Image (cartoon, rainbow, N blue to C red):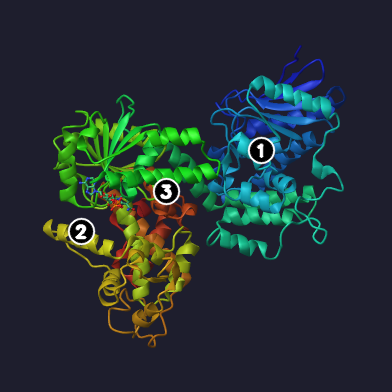
Amino acid sequence: MTHPTTASTIRWEQDDDGVVTLVLDDPDQSANTMNAAFIDSLDAIADRVEAERDAIRGIIVTSAKKTFFAGGDLNDLIQVGPGQAQEIYDKNLRIKRALRRIETLGKPVVAAINGAALGGGLEIALACHHRIALDAPGARIGFPEVTLGLLPGSGGVARTVRLLGVTDALLKWLLQGTRYSPLRAQEAGLVDDVVTTREELLTRARAFIAAHPESAQPWDDKDYRIPGGTPAQPKFAVNLPAFPANLRKQLNGAPYPAQRNILAAAVEGSQVDFETAQIIEARYFTELVVGQTAKNMIQAFFFDLQAVNSGANRPQGIEPSQVRKVAVLGAGMMGAGIAFACAKAGIEVVLKDVSVEAAAKGKAYSEELLAKALAKGRTTEAKRDQLLARITPTADPRDLEGCDAVIEAVFEDPALKHKVFQEIEGIVAPDALLCSNTSTLPITLLAEGVQRADDFIGLHFFSPVDKMPLVEIIKGEHTGDKALARAFDLVRQIGKTPIVVNDSRGFFTSRVIGHFLNEGVAMVGEGIDPASVEQAAAQAGYPAKVLSLMDELTLTLPRKIREETRRATVEAGGEWRPHPADAVIDRMVEEFGRPGRSGGAGFYDYDETTGKRTGLWPGLREHFAPGGSGGSGGAGGSGGSGGAAREGTRIPLEDMKERMLFCEAIDTVRLLEEGVLTSVADANIGSILGIGFPGWTGGVLQYINGYEGGVAGFVARARQLEAAYGERFAPPALLVEKAERGERFTD
Ligand code: NAI
């Protein structure tokens, strides 16, 4: 017999054996979150378990929803103002106190994790003495807080550190935001047991209660030591003074505020008792919640990502579609990756190149990826064989019969692209979706080579395709809504995130990343120490350093793109404005014979045998220092000119960082003005997931919104940069208008 009692979002069910099941079940939402109603319920539950302690044998915490518990209420968190710090801190301690009262009741408490337990959900589970997870499809367990600029503030840091030790807690759980399957969560140490049915979940929970009548948390034993302790350092596993520095190295550059605060909460909290650790955690949590970075990241990684993936940009009223068999034309680097991504999603792939050998080489790429996955236990032999069986390499266009989509990835040459489409258009299904993976060529131009321009669309993948989550969909002038909807569905079918833009040379991503690269190169041309330029990119939060990225892409590529863009601009009657980087790139290629990594030399030197980077080319300082040999050193005019020969120009680090961030943000606004971009969410998500715009900003337009002083503050700073470094920083009209009206960039 059960005696249900309500405490609005947590149901109390008690059986005749005295086992209380606390069922998380928010009546107003599809998932349980840490909203105000939940906090009230938790307090009420803590009161009741204490009052009825003697009649309780044990407690099971589970949920009536599909997920166990979804975490913090992001709608609330994104609105918190800087004046609310005390309120946030008090609320946080209230949650902690209530969980602690249940945890220290002296009765066994078991988490029966029936679905996803992310963030707050995992924290509730950690406040229990034993965690059993149901291996349900899609059930994920982890702390995604760091990806939202937050830290697990409901005891998550303090408890994970105590269970696993500082190093494992930070690296496996807190700093990466990894979402584990229940089995992997068990391997990584935060889940005790995994079951496959709901019944078993509850049976095992009861069995634990029966076997541990006086269960408590290990850290409430006075002799408990945090794992990894050594006799010399009884409580701490790692070399404390060196730890933050090592971690900084591992994170490749400057940690974001969330990473910094998680690190500090974990390390400081490990040196004190549990209650003090919780207070330390609350302070660091509060600081993040009231700060701007968390708002940026919640906006991008929760709200914008949801908008983009749910199809805010997919034309309405068109039936959902699925691709069954795809033709991938060109089995080079991109074609091979696209073939793998499609086959992984269960799509039959015909991979065509000029010879069967070339096509087979493309398929071999999937074999390599799968061999690695197998070695790491991420796939099985059976799954590997099934995936490989889906890829048919060929040189014969007739093998493309029946394909309902085509993705072309041959060389970046419009005539060749026209030719390969002509060759296959009559063979594939008569209504096949026709996609090009061009990275720069206008889609409308490429569509001239096909009969059905309304079915032709750009599908711009990023390299390496298996890792990069974004696909930029480009609508040509004649692309129909149906093709757009089908392209969107195809991208979702292969599990990637689609953004949609209108046609233009370089679209959104290729054009904007070009500004970042050019800005780094221009600084070298001004005589700024190239090592500082690389450091500035890392400090700004870019995942790749600017000159090393330029070398990877090769210096010949921007020259080619520049020439094509210049010709097209002039032909269209526009004014062509050279960039200060142009002269540097030209000299690197023509004068010094350094075209980038594939040519064995670029901004960096490379080892002749291994091809590995050995260091920045010393000639950069010599040839590009103000007063150095020839060329146009000092272009951009920051006051660098006039410096002593080979002394190098110095500008503030903040200027270097902001020159990179601003040039990308400013051109994105121009793309909005030009109608290439039509959605703020697409711009934010595309910039982070596609071209490495730093995640802490929340994306390229959120960076403007969140800049100190808002859009007006951004405009004022752009004008300063314009005066110091050139007209490319002049704020576009749309930006100035927004600033004057006090508006932000929103959809
Ligand atoms: P790649 O040079 O590695 O591969 C091109 C492949 O096309 C080669 O295997 C070549 O044999 C094949 N090919 C040439 N003529 C052919 C024909 N008539 N029929 C079938 N196959 C033919 O080039 P990559 O890097 O894979 O680039 C391909 C396309 O993807 C280009 O349009 C490029 O702009 C675009 N792209 C490249 C990215 C990158 O990071 N490399 C990123 C996004 C797009």
Q: Is residue 418 above or below residue 124?
A: below
Residue 574 position within the rendered picture, expressed as x and y whole percent measured from the top left: 15, 59
Q: According to the image, label 1 marks what residue?
A: 186
Please indicate, yes or no, whether residue 7 appears anywhere in the rendered image.
no
The outermost residue toward the front is: 357
Label 2 – label 3 distance at C-alpha: 25 Å
Residue 142 position within the rendered picture, expressed as x and y whole percent measured from the top left: 60, 40
Res 646 quadrant in image: bottom left
Ligand 1 contact, mark 1 (Cβ < 8 Å): no
Residue ID at (54%, 31%) = 138
Res 327 quadrant in image: top left
The outermost residue toward the bottom is: 644
Residue 190 position within the rendered picture, expressed as x and y whole percent measured from the top left: 68, 40
Q: Amino acid at mark 2?
A: Thr
Label 1 – label 2 distance at C-alpha: 54 Å
Residue 689's tag is: 3
Q: Secondary structure at mark 1?
A: helix
Residue ID at (44%, 45%) = 369
Q: Are marks 1 and 2 in contact (CB under 8 Å)?
A: no
Q: Amino acid at mark 3?
A: Leu
Q: Nearer the viewer, mark 1 or mark 2?
A: 1
Res 550 quadrant in image: bottom left
Q: Are marks 2 and 3 in contact (CB under 8 Å)?
A: no
